[in-house]
Image (spheres, rainbow, N blue to C red):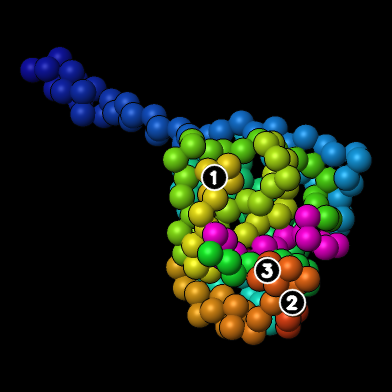
Amino acid sequence: MRLLLAVLMMVVLAPVASASPEAAPTAKCEFIPTPDNPAARPVQPPSAVVPARGTVKVTIVTNYGVVGANLDRANAPCGVENFAHLARSWFYTMSQCWRLTDTTRLGVLQCGDIYRAEEGGPGYRFADEVTGKETYSRGTIAYGNQGPGTNGSEFFIVHSFANIAPNYTVMGHVTYGMDTLDRIVKAGIVPQPDGLLDGAPKKPVRILHVLAH
């Protein structure tokens, strides 16, 4: 009887093996220095190993109003991590959106360049994260580039539509504040010699700060 009780106690008190938690998925990114195009503001590249699941919520505060968005790590892990990293490094703080388009093909606000349109990046570049099936509907936030594998800090927000090739990494979509974009568009674009509505906003569009959380 005593032996039976001892065995039962051993069974009851024996530690229960718990299942190991499933490791969160990650992605490897290569942030390649661009010495011919150094960083416009002091910033280090993000980590080479980044989360590949979850959402980053961002709040873009402009002189026209606030834009909120959800960025999808699963769709563009390197791009989303980079954007969040630049935001947390204050890279976008007190910067300007240099380009606004409102044509039958393209309706976007382009931001993220420090000096002028397509000039003034973070001093590194990284690869595209595209499948060839990307579409760019109203509210889409995507990276701008100057060719394959040249992503950096430049991004655009679609205020109407963008009938463009699927060559631009989609980070996520606006969740609130599209009326801010509408006000920017309504304020107009600096007239171009050819009459095309593609140039600097008539009233400067400034990013006061970007929060990423």
- Residue 196, disc: 3
Give the percent coordinates (x, y) of residue 44.
Answer: 80, 46
Mark sitting earlier along the chain (3/1): 1
In space, the residues marked 3 and 2 are separated at their CA atoms by 8 Å
Specify few, some or many for label 1: CA neighbours under 10 Å numbering under 14, 14-19, or 20 or more.
few
Amino acid marked by disc 2? Pro
Residue drawn at the location 69% of the way across and 47% of the way down: 145
Return the residue at label 1: 165
Amino acid marked by disc 3? Leu
Specify few, some or many for label 3: CA neighbours under 10 Å numbering under 14, 14-19, or 20 or more.
few
164 or 124, which lies in front?
164
Q: Residue furthest left?
A: 1
In the depicted structure, whether residue 105 falls above or below residue 72:
below
Say which quadrant the C terminus sits in.
bottom right
Amino acid marked by disc 1? Ala
In the depicted structure, whether residue 178 falls above or below residue 44:
below
Magenta span covers which residues? Answer: 105-118
Say which quadrant the N terminus sits in.
top left
Under tag 2, what secondary structure? loop
Return the residue at label 2: 191
In the depicted structure, whether residue 54 falls above or below residue 181:
above
In the drawing, does residue 92 fall left or right of residue 64?
A: right
- Residue 102, disc: none
